[in-house]
Amino acid sequence: MMTVQSVAPIARPLRWWARGLAGGALTALPVVLIGLAVLLAAPGWVQHLTTMALINLMIVVGLQVYSGNSGIVHLGHSAFVGLGAYGMAILTTPLAMKKLSIPNAPFGLSAVELHWFPGGLLALGVVWVIAWTTARVIARLSGIAATIVSLAFLIVVHSVFLHWPALFKGNQAFFGIPKLVGLPGVLLAAVVVILIARLFRDSPGGLQLRASAQDQMAADSIAIDSRALRRRAWILSALICGLAGVLFAVVSGTISPRLFYFQQVMLTLAMLILGGMGSVSGAVAGAVILSVVLELIRTVESGITIGGYTTPTLLGLSGVALGAVIVLCMALRPQGLLGHQEADDFLSRWLRTAPTRKR
Amino acid sequence: MTEYLIQQLLNALAFGAEYALIALGLAVVFSIMGLVNFAHGEVIAASAYAALLFAGLGLGAPLLVIGLAIAAAIAVSVTLERVAFRPVRNAPVTTGLLTAFGVSIVLQNLFQLLISPRPQAFPALNGLNATWHIGPWAVSSLQVMELVVALLAMLALGGFLGRSSLGIAMRAASRDFATVRLMGIQANRVVAAAFVISGALAGIACVFILARRGGVTPDMGFSLVLKAFVACVIGGFGSLFGAAAGGMLLGFIEVGLLVLLPQEMGGLKEALTYVIVTLILVYRPEGLFGSRRDLGDKEF
Amino acid sequence: MLHLDKVSVRYGPVRAVLDLELAVGQGELIALLGPNGAGKSSTIGAINGLVPATGTITLGGEDISRLSVEERIARGIAVAPEGRRIFVNLTVAENLRLGAALRRDKAGVRADTERYLTLFPVLAERIGQPAGTLSGGEQQMLAIARAMMSRPRVLLLDEPSLGLAPLIVTRIFDLIGQLKSEGLTVILVEQNAAQAMRFADQVCVLASGRISYRGTPRDLAGTDVMKLYLGGA
C-alpha cells in the first residue's frame, strides 16, 4: 500500500483566468493603495497630478498589451488616445460651447450632445472601427515594417486633427468638455484595465502570441494564427488607449492635438521600457516610478529657488532624461526592471524560499 | 503647361533625391548591423548646428561650410556608434531600435537645452539657391545640384560596395557578420565604415536642407528621417537599391499629391502620402524590392 | 604547429568541451570524430575564437588564446565553417577575394586564385555567379577554396560532408587529401568516419566533451570504438 497521506498535497494549478485575476489584483494593489492615500490625504493639485499619471499608466498598459505580447514596438498608440479624447469631446461637449468651438462640424455633429455614458461608448466604438481597420494592415506586417507603419499611423491621425479644423479645431485647444471624472473614477478604470491586460496576457491567445513573438516559425508549425492574434492584441490595445483618451478629455476639459503626439509616445514608451515590456506589472511599475521621477525633474526644469538663487529654466531636461532612461535601460537591462516576471511570480518565489531564508 | 510639368518633375526628382540620400544612410547601417537608426535625423541636425557654429566663428564661406558640415556629420555618426550603439550591437533588433529612438530623443532635447528650441537662421548657403535658365525653362539651381550630387553619391557608393575589399566585406557582412570575421576582417572596421558612409550621406543631405530652408530647428531631422524610413520600408528594408528607389518614389508621390490636391486640402498631403505607402505595403508586405530572405537562398 | 592545453568550453552550466589536450604537427591531418553534441564544433570554435574558451592554445609556439577572432585569422588560422557559410549574395570571385582580404601581395593572390580555380574547375565555370546559386557540393568547394586563399598555416574544416551526396563527399575528400599532401596542416571535424580516416594521421574520438579514444586510423580499425561511437565503418 502506498502511504498517500504522507505525500504533500500537490496544489492544483489554477485556471488561467483565476491566476490572471489574482495576479492582476496583486499588480493593481499598490496602485490602489497609492490612489487611496492621495485621495484621502493629498491636496487638490497632487490629486490632479495623480489622476493624470493614472491615465498615463492606462496608456502604458494599453501599449504593453500589443508590444509586450507581440514583441513589436508600437509607436502609434497615442493616436488612439487622441481619437478617444476627440471622440468624447465632440460627442459630449454642450451645444452652447460647440457653437463657439466647432459651429460647422460635418455630419451634423455640432447639433449633438450626448450623455457621458453613450458618448463614451460611441467614442470607443469609433476607436474600435479604426483599430479594426488598421489591424488588418498592421497584422500583415512584422518587425520593423510594423513599427514604421504604426508611426505613420500616428502621423496620419495627427495630421488629420490639424488639418480638419471644422471637426477638430486644428492646432487650437478644444475646450468646454464637461469635467465629469476625478481621481476615484480614473483609479477604478486603471484597475479594470490592469486586470484586462493581465487576463489577455495569461489567456491561451496571449500565450500563443507571446510564443509566436519568440519564434515565428515554430509558432507557424503548430498552427498558431499569429496574424489573427496580433490583430486581437492591436484592437484591445487600441481600446485601452482609447479609454484613457476618453477619460483624459473628461478629466482635463481641454485637449489639443499635440498632447497626443510624440511627447506622449516617448513618455509612455520610456515608462514601459523601464518597467519591462514583458509583463503588466512591469508596465505598472515603470509608469509609477517614472511619473514620480519626472515630476521632480519638471520642478528643476522650470527653475528652482535655492536660498535666493533661482536656477535658469532648462527646457528639454525632462526629454533628455526620458531618452536617457531608454538608452540606459537598453544597454544595461534591456528586459526592463521586472523582466518577464509578474508581481505574483515574485511573490510565489519569495513564499517558496521564505522558510529556508528564516533559518 | 509643359513648363509647369517640367518644374514639377524636377521638384519630384529633387525631393526624391533627398529622401533617397537619407534612406540610403539608414539602409547602409541597417543592412550591416540590423540597427534601425532613428538617430540618423539628429546626425543631420547636429551637422546643421555644427555648420551654424562654424559660421559663427567666421568660417562661413559656402565651400568651407559644406565640407565642415559633412565632416561634422561623419564625426557625429561614428561617435554615436561608439558611445550608444556598440553596447547593443549583438542585441535583438528591437533593442537597437529603442536605443536609437532614445538617442534621438536625447539629442533633440539637448539641442533645445543647449542651443534653443526656436529656429536659428542660417543664411550662409542661400547663394546656392538661384534660378538657372536652361533653354526655355527656368529651374532652381539647388534642385538640379541636389539631383546631380545625389546621383553621384549613389554611384560612388555603388562603386565602393562593388569594387573595394571593404565594400565587398560590407555586403558580405549584411548577410553573415560572423563569417566575415572568420576572413580576418575586423568587425569594428566594417561597422565604422557603415557609419562613416551613413554620416557622409547625412552630411550631404544636410547641406541641401540648410540651403533650402535657410535655418535649423532641433527636430528638423526627425520628420525627414521618418519619411526616409517609409522609403526604406516600401523599398524593402535593408536593400540599398530599395532605399534609393523608395526615396524617389516617395518624392513622386508627394509632388503628385501636391499637384493633384485642391489648395484647401494641401495640409493633408503628408497624411495621404503615408496612407498610400501603407496601402502599397498591404499588397507587398516585404516591400517593392525586398526579398523574403529566409526563403529561396541555399543557406544552412 | 597547433597545441591545445586544457581547453574547456562552457555554455552556461553545460560543459561542451572539458580539458581537451591536442597537438597537431606541421603537415598533419587530425580528425575529430564523434556523435552530435560531442564537442567537435565547440573545439573548432575555441580554436578560431568565435566560442569563448578557457585553457591555452598555441600556434607555432605563440599563445593565441587571448586573441580576438580576427587576430587569430591574421596569425594563419583559416576556417571552412560548418554549413559552409559562403556569402550567398556575393559572386564566387568576390568570395575568394574576401578569403584573401588580409593579404597585400596582389600577384600572389592572383596566382592563388588561378591555382584554386584549376583545382576546383567547377568554380571557374561559375566565377561570376552569386554563390547562392551554387549546389551544395560546389558551395563546400568554394568554402574550402575561400579558406585556402589566406594561405593558412592551419585549416579548420568543420563537417565538409554535411548534407552532401556520397559521390560528392568522396570528391571533396580527394581534394582535402591533395591539399594535405602539399603540406597543409588540417584539423578535420567529421561524422563520416570512413572518409575522415582516409587521410588522417591521428584520430580523436570525442564523447561528451572529452577524448575517449586517440590513435592512428590503423589502430582504430580493429577496436570496438568504431562500433561504440561511430556505428561501424
Image (cartoon, coloured by chain):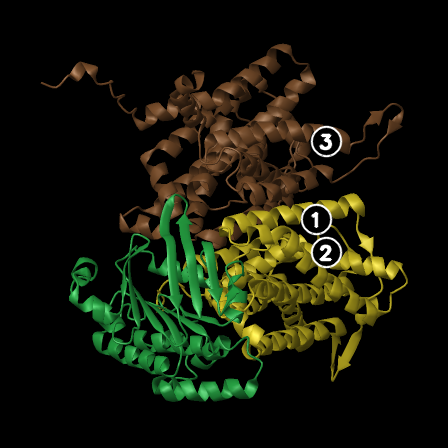
Left or right side of B49 for A326: left
Determine the chain carrying the residue at label 3. Answer: A
Which residue carries the number 1 mark?
B107
Would residue C89 be found to the left or right of residue A263 on screen?
Answer: left
Q: CA distance from mark 3 to mark 1?
A: 18 Å
Residue at 76% x, 64% y is B69
Q: From the rendered image, report the letter of the chain displayed in brown.
A: A
Q: Secondary structure at mark 1?
A: helix
Is C104 displayed left or right of B211 in the figure?
left
Chain letter for the part of the structure drawn in green: C
Tags 1 and 2 in contact by the CB under 8 Å rule? yes
Is residue B98 in view from this perspective?
yes
Instruction: From the top left corner, tell me how far across and down residue C73 is, in percent.
Output: 50, 69
Q: Which residue is outermost to the top?
A: A40
Chain under disc 1: B
B273 or A222, nearer to the observer: A222
Disc 3 marks which amino acid?
Arg
Q: Are marks 2 and 3 on the same chain?
A: no
Q: CA distance from mark 2 to mark 3?
A: 25 Å
Provide residue C115's location: percent of width, then percent of height: 42, 88
Above or below, comparing residue A16 to residue A219 in the picture: above
Identify the residue at image location x=56%, y=36%: A274
Identify the element where label 2 is drawn.
helix
Mark 2, chain letter?
B
Disc 2 marks which residue?
Answer: B45
Residue at (78%, 69%) from the top-left corner? Answer: B67
Residue highlighted by disc 3: A298
Q: Is B34 situated above or below A309? A: below
